[in-house]
Amino acid sequence: MTDSNNYFKPFCTISRALGTAASQEELLDLVVQSAIDAMGGKAACLFLADERRDVFVPMAQKGLSDNYLHANPMKAQEIVRALVDKGHLVFEDATSDPRLEHHAAKKREGIASLLTVPVVVRERPIGVLSLYTAEHRQFSSEEIEFLCALAEQGGMAIEKSRLLERIEKNALLFLDLASAINSTLDINEVLHNLTVKVSESLGMKGVTIRLLDDESGELKLVASHGLSDTILNVGQHTDTATTAAALKGETVTVADALSDERTRFKAELEQEGVGSMIITPITARDEVIGILRLYSPVKRKYPQDVITLVQALAHQGGLAIQNASMYLKLKEDQKALEADVWSHRSWF
């Protein structure tokens, strides 16, 4: 049992760190160390979700040896699911509890009891904070509440760090693409660069750009990156709910492509490994001329700043197409003018 007076200082320290330019690594180390100091623990570890591999990996730990064995990814997923249901998990004897693995390793490490709580951001579990003790303990409700609050502080630290990183990355991406658009009038090159850079910078599986053919009414593929022919072939349909909305000028986000009732071709999406999507219109002179579609390998809800960035990039693509069209028209007008002047000269 720890003195409740020890709980106030860690929160003050972490709150001050959140207001500074501390890195995510520094903040997470501070959370882990605060858990040990305030609760008299032997060690602590903070795990974060790796969405691409659907596993939780240790990001910050104190008091554990470098070769200590954590639970394998599948076992960790079971623990996280249990945490979501119960809010916390207590393992009074970590060396024999059947819910845990590597009992012998825990015994060698000198671990007796274990308290685990979720790290939650916007009601979504993104990680786990575990406290290890050298003596067998029955954790009080006050101790459990403190570790949960500390994990919440860790979630705030992670969210802040990720947001700042995302803002910087998004600004650089927009600047890079704006520079690329201004550097060439080769529309094929511009649109190809757009699909590649958006896919790589935003961690997408693939990106497509389709332009609307006024005569046939079809969406014709003009640029793509990272996708199979199967997905490219089904993407030309304009009668899907998501495509119809985008052609009306709406941006559509699909958090779960395999369960959302608006999506068709679910078998193809599952085979491709698509988890979620963003679909946004490409406009020129306030008219929808095409669609930019982003395919993500993970299921997720997209923050507003990412959606706004995608809309801005689609707008840049529309400007590039408009500029290229005007350039081609000027070249045609120039040729017509030269031919007209030459015909007049032939009169003399």
Image (cartoon, rainbow, N blue to C red):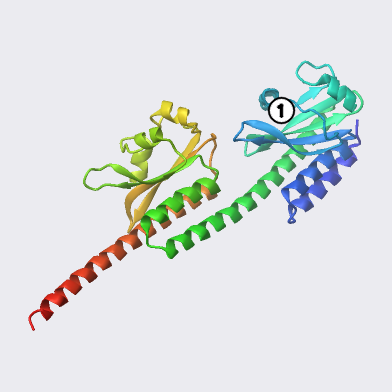
The image position of residue 254, as x and y in percent, is: 47, 36
Residue at image location 82% in from the left, 49% down from the top: 13
In which quadrant of the rendered image does the C terminus lie? bottom left
* Mark 1 lies on residue: 87
Q: Amino acid at mark 1?
A: Gly
The image position of residue 141, as x and y in percent, is: 81, 28
Q: Is residue 120 left or right of residue 1?
A: left
The image position of residue 295, as x and y in percent, is: 47, 39
- In the image, residue 45 above or below residue 136: below
Q: Nearer the viewer, residue 262 or 177?
A: 177
Image quadrant of residue 239?
Answer: top left
Residue at image location 43% in from the left, 64% down from the top: 182
Q: Is residue 189 left or right of residue 133?
A: left
The image position of residue 25, as x and y in percent, is: 75, 47
In which quadrant of the rendered image does the N terminus lie? top right
Q: How many marks?
A: 1
Image quadrant of residue 155?
Answer: top right
Q: Label 1 crowding class (10 Å Cα cut-off): few <14, some 14-19, many 20+?
A: some
Look at the numbered disc 1 and give the secondary structure of its residue: loop
Q: Is residue 153 left or right of residue 268?
A: right
Residue 62 can be seen, yes or no: yes
- In the image, residue 230 above or below residue 197: above
Residue at image location 35% in from the left, 35% down from the top: 233
